[in-house]
Image: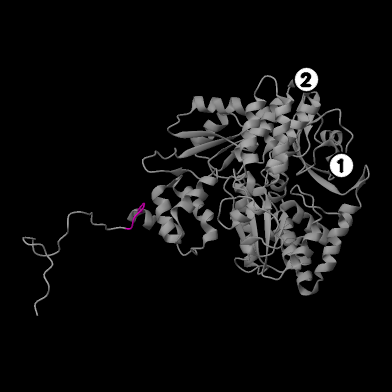
């Protein structure tokens, strides 16, 4: 029997089409080019295509090309088997990724980020940025304002590529550009070999061979150590909360100290990184963590390189297995200092804070029980285990026990990190920093970053410690002390703080997202509408998901209370 002929009469021989549709050679949606696919495959090499590594791979593309194109996103999506929209949403959440759409011009090869935090603004950052914008070719160099870089002691500061320039001037920038000096400069620090010579890691070895984690926990509790990221929760108690949950368990280190005015973690990591690393490994031993994640802010390129080198030294010495310490690089998002947002970022996602409960001690990284500690907290865990709880609990001043690392900047003679008794007052802190800068009279101070607002100089006898400042409507937080003088205005300082919160709000909840924006607009009025601002503060404090929106009203309320004559 002859085959059925379905061709229309008169049709040419061979394959025929109706002419009604278009032949499709590719799937629907944006396509990647062969060049982009080859480039992404080359960049990723033999690295695992795990979803949680997405941000690390976006850094690879950004570092190599200076931007992330639509082509790159399409090729990366195929390589990692995830949606392009998901990659785009993640990349555009973080300030340090430049996503370039089809037809858009990529940014110039060189980017300068000028810090606009309170300390830098007081030191002339706005004038510096304008001078750079006027004096540089925008087709060759891009000048951006950026949030705190954790170098407030050398304000004003800028970052050219990955090279930070302290006490920055246009002349220093021109010299760096001419010399091609755009890479991070590593300070002198205590290496693995030197640390071991001085008895380092002996305590960790002793505990691993037969230590009692509960005894170590008691030591930490006896010392009085509390979380030094800002929350102040008793550090040892966390260990028991994590241990009571079935494994696998993880440890996550919060190294994203983005609170403007804070630079204590950088100070310790750039000098004695192994004191922190040993403390981290002791805490990991105590909770039987399967992996230690260190989430370090991208604004600290020198610290990131130091940690890469010293983690490799630990692996080579056999103290940890390869991959046991997983160093993750942030990408410019203050919100990732909130522990659950940090965990979302470690998982390769947008850093949106989670609703709680459940708490991260139960449901943390990859849904498993996770111990979260700040860098300085683990620095003290190491010290306590080696020298005993007396290193903290034997120090007493004004009825307070312990030591605090104060990051001091602003109108003082010698800004820097000062280790002082926890009962120190603002006058003690200013005195340690060499007194007020020449020609300046003490007017006000920020006791713990923008989240703590401003206090007047008349409140000078309160210990800057946990629990002592709450009756005043503020808190110590990360002990980021910024000192203002008679040459500054409290209203301008508060506006700087609220602009920071407006920029850094993750946008997940309306009270914070819309509240910060409205607050900035209201605070720019010649006379503040205090009733409306107080209503706004009430809503933000009561209804925001996380601490950013809850604390953002503090600068507004304290200026209205203590500096009413300015508004």
> Which of 368 and 458 lies nearest the eye of the viewer?
368
Q: Where does residue 295 sit, x and y in percent of width and height?
A: 63, 54
Q: Residues within 10 Å of mark 1 (few under 14, many from 20)?
A: some
> Which of 425 and 155 lies nearest the eye of the viewer?
425
Residue at image coords 51%, 27%: 133
Q: Classify mark 1: helix, strand or loop.
A: loop
**Looking at the figure, which quarter contains the C terminus?**
top right
Q: Is residue 326 visible?
A: yes
Residue at image coords 73%, 59%: 195
| Residue of label 1 | 468
Q: Relative to 10, say whether 3 is above or below.
A: below
Q: Residue furthest left?
A: 10
Callout count? 2
Q: Which residues are magenta?
A: 27-32
Q: Is residue 84 left or right of residue 93?
A: left
Q: Where does residue 315 sit, x and y in percent of width and height?
A: 63, 66
Residue at image coords 72%, 49%: 268
What colour-coding does the image apply?
one colour
Q: Distance of mark 1 from mark 2, alpha carbons?
A: 27 Å
Residue at image coords 68%, 41%: 549
> Which of 171 and 19 lies nearest the eye of the viewer?
19
> Which of 536 and 459 lies nearest the eye of the viewer?
536
Q: Relative to 525, say whether 174 is above or below.
A: below
Residue 29 located within the stretch drawn in magenta? yes
Q: Is residue 412 left or right of residue 398?
A: left
Q: Is residue 276 left or right of residue 114?
A: right
Residue 277: mark in rendering: none
| Residue of label 2 | 565
Q: Where does residue 411 sit, x and y in percent of width and height?
A: 75, 29
CB-based contact (under 8 Å), mark 1 and mark 2: no
């Amino acid at each position: 029997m002859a085959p059925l002929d379905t061709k229309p009469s008169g049709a040419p021989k061979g394959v025929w089409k109706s002419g009604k549709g278009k032949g499709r050679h590719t799937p629907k949606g944006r396509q990647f080019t062969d060049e982009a696919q080859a480039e992404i495959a080359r960049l990723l090499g033999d690295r695992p295509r795990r979803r949680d590594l997405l941000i690390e791979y976006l850094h690879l593309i950004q570092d190599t090309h200076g931007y992330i194109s639509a082509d790159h996103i399409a090729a990366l999506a195929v390589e990692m088997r995830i949606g392009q929209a998901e990659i785009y949403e993640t990349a555009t959440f973080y300030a340090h990724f430049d996503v370039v759409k089809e037809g858009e011009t990529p940014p110039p090869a060189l980017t300068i980020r000028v810090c606009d935090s309170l300390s830098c603004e007081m030191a002339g950052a706005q004038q510096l940025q304008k001078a750079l914008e006027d004096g540089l070719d925008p087709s060759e160099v891009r000048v951006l304002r950026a949030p705190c870089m954790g170098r407030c002691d050398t304000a004003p500061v800028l970052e050219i590529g990955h090279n930070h320039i302290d006490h920055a001037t246009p002349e220093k920038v021109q010299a760096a550009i001419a010399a091609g000096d755009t890479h991070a400069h590593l300070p002198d620090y205590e290496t693995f070999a030197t640390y071991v010579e001085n008895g380092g890691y002996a305590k960790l070895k002793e505990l691993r061979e037969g230590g009692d984690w509960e005894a170590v926990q008691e030591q930490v509790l006896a010392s009085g150590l509390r979380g030094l990221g800002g929350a102040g929760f008793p550090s040892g108690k966390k260990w028991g909360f994590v241990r009571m949950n079935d494994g696998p368990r993880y440890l996550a280190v919060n190294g994203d100290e983005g609170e403007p005015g804070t630079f204590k973690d950088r100070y310790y990591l750039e000098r004695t990184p192994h004191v922190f690393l040993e403390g981290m490994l002791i805490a990991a031993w105590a909770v039987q963590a399967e992996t230690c994640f260190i989430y370090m802010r991208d604004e600290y390129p020198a610290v990131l390189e130091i940690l890469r080198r010293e983690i490799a030294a630990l692996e080579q010495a056999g103290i940890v297995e390869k991959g046991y310490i997983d160093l993750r690089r942030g990408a410019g998002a203050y919100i990732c200092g909130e522990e659950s947002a940090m965990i979302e970022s470690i998982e390769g996602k947008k850093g949106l804070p989670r609703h709680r409960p459940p708490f991260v001690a139960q449901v943390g990284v990859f849904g498993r029980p996770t111990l979260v500690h700040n860098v300085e907290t683990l620095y003290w865990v190491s010290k306590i285990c080696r020298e005993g709880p007396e290193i903290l609990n034997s120090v007493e001043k004004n009825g307070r026990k312990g030591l605090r690392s104060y990051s001091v900047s602003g109108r003082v003679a010698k800004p820097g990190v000062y280790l002082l008794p926890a009962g120190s007052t603002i006058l003690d802190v200013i005195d340690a920093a060499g007194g007020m800068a020449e020609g300046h009279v003490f007017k006000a101070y920020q006791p713990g970053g923008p989240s703590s607002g401003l206090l007047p100089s008349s409140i000078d006898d309160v210990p800057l410690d946990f629990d002592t400042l709450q009756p005043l409507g503020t808190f110590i937080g990360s002990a980021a002390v910024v000192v203002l003088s008679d040459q500054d205005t409290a209203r301008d300082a508060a506006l700087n703080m609220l602009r920071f919160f407006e920029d850094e709000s993750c946008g997940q909840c309306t009270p914070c997202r819309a509240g910060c924006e409205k607050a900035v607009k209201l605070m720019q009025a010649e006379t503040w509408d205090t009733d409306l601002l107080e209503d706004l503060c009430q809503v933000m404090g009561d209804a925001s998901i996380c601490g950013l929106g809850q604390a953002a009203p503090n600068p507004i309320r304290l200026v209205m209370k203590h500096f009413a004559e300015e508004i």
